Image (cartoon, rainbow, N blue to C red):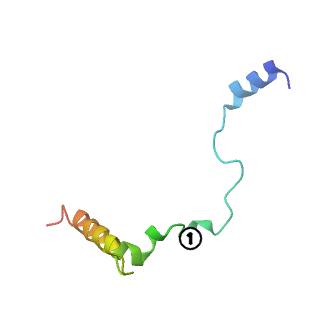
Amino acid sequence: MSKEEDFQHILEHGINFGRGGQQASGDEDKVKTKAKKKQYITGAHGSGSARQKAKYREQRANRHKR
């Protein structure tokens, strides 16, 4: 393609900065980090910092509840 054809193609179709391919099926269900697992969210795995973060999450969740 020449530069003019490239430019015309961009004008007609735009530029896509998204992913090159489609996501593999089944990846949506997977937990990718430990921070998203239930034990870490609730602070049940024994780490003091996780328990403290869980306490803050609970306080934030209950902030506007009456």
Residue type at tag 1: Asp
Work out whether 20 lies above or below 7: below
> 25 and 31: which one is in front?
31
Classify residue 44 as left or right of residue 3: left
Query: How many numbered marks does the figure carry?
Result: 1
Taking the spot 67% from the left edge, 66% from the top edge, the residue there is 25
| SS at badge 1 | helix
* x, y percent for residue 37: 45, 74
Q: Residue furthest left?
A: 66
Q: Residue furthest top?
A: 4
Q: The C terminus appears in which quarter of the rendering?
A: bottom left
* x, y percent for residue 2: 84, 21
Classify residue 46 as left or right of residue 56: right
Q: Which residue is mark 1?
A: 29
Q: Residue furthest right?
A: 1
Taking the spot 30% from the left edge, 71% from the top edge, the residue there is 54
Work out whether 17 lies above or below 28: above
* x, y percent for residue 18: 63, 44
Q: To which quarter of the image does residue 50 belong?
A: bottom left
Q: To which quarter of the image does residue 9 belong?
A: top right
Taking the spot 86% from the left edge, 26% from the top edge, the residue there is 1
Label 1 crowd bin: few (<14), some (14–19), many (20+), radius 10 Å: few
Taking the spot 33% from the left edge, 70% from the top edge, the residue there is 49
* x, y percent for residue 55: 25, 71
Work out whether 6 lies above or below 40: above
